[in-house]
Amino acid sequence: DTGVSQNPRHKITKRGQNVTFRCDPISEHNRLYWYRQTLGQGPEFLTYFQNEAQLEKSRLLSDRFSAERPKGSFSTLEIQRTEQGDSAMYLCASSSGDSATNEKLFFGSGTQLSVL
Amino acid sequence: AQKVTQAQTEISVVEKEDVTLDCVYETRDTTYYLFWYKQPPSGELVFLIRRNSFDEQNEISGRYSWNFQKSTSSFNFTITASQVVDSAVYFCALVDSSYKLIFGSGTRLLVRP
């Protein structure tokens, strides 16, 4: 068990470019979450998957954002036409999903996105 | 609506002092879970404790203790004899029927030698 892995750790891009982040959850975990964290704030929920199915998306996830989890394993989060307001830490978490309300989430170290 | 409030933005203590981090939550549900996570400078959120709404017993784990009071909707976290390694941002969080982990804005703890 190597924990939740996120790549890259840091991404610097120019406004208008597309970026893609990857998350590899703990292998036996069937739930995968994406959160966004800005400086001085707590993480904000973006979306989550139960296996390969995307079950919920936050209003924060505009049309420029898309997340996938093919085959219920790793997940990717893509941001198209990045804006400076997208600059944040993007956190991935996974859980075993035994119960939706008492989940202990295991978080990765995040991808820090800077949009210039 | 669900909400978690951590009114203390930053706390600074001297090593070996006790420190309490406050957390107040809002939910309409009777069944919910409360969490504390630690975020060290490396950025990874580390799970500390999970408590369900039907268990108001206080919990102690080493130098850490948690005081859950439903009457005041609070779930406070105390570190006894703080150490420099305790310096981090601490987040309180809530899960209810929305199935999403809702975080507070965090309290940055600085423990000075």
Image (cartoon, coloured by chain):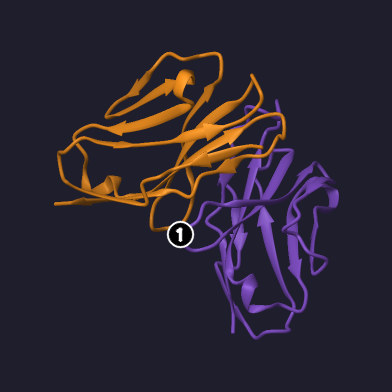
Chain colours: A purple, B orange
Q: Residue at x 73, y 83 (%)?
A: A17
Percent x, y of residue A67: 79, 58
Front residue of A72 and B20: B20
Percent x, y of residue A102: 62, 27
Residue under circle 1? A40
Q: Is residue A3 above or below residue B53?
A: below
Residue A1 visible within the image: no
Front residue of A5 and B89: B89
Query: Is residue A8 shown left or right of residue B49?
Result: right
Please, which chain is the residue tagged with disc 1 on?
A: A
User: If the image is split into quadrants, where does the N terminus of chain A sit?
Assistant: top right
Dividing the picture into quarters, in which one does residue B64 lie?
top left
Q: Residue at x 76, y 55 (%)?
A: A59
User: If the image is split into quadrants, where does the C terminus of chain A sit?
Assistant: bottom right
Q: Is residue A66 above or below residue A24?
A: below
* Mark 1 secondary-structure assignment: loop
Q: Residue at x 70, y 26 (%)?
A: A99
Residue B62 visible within the image: yes
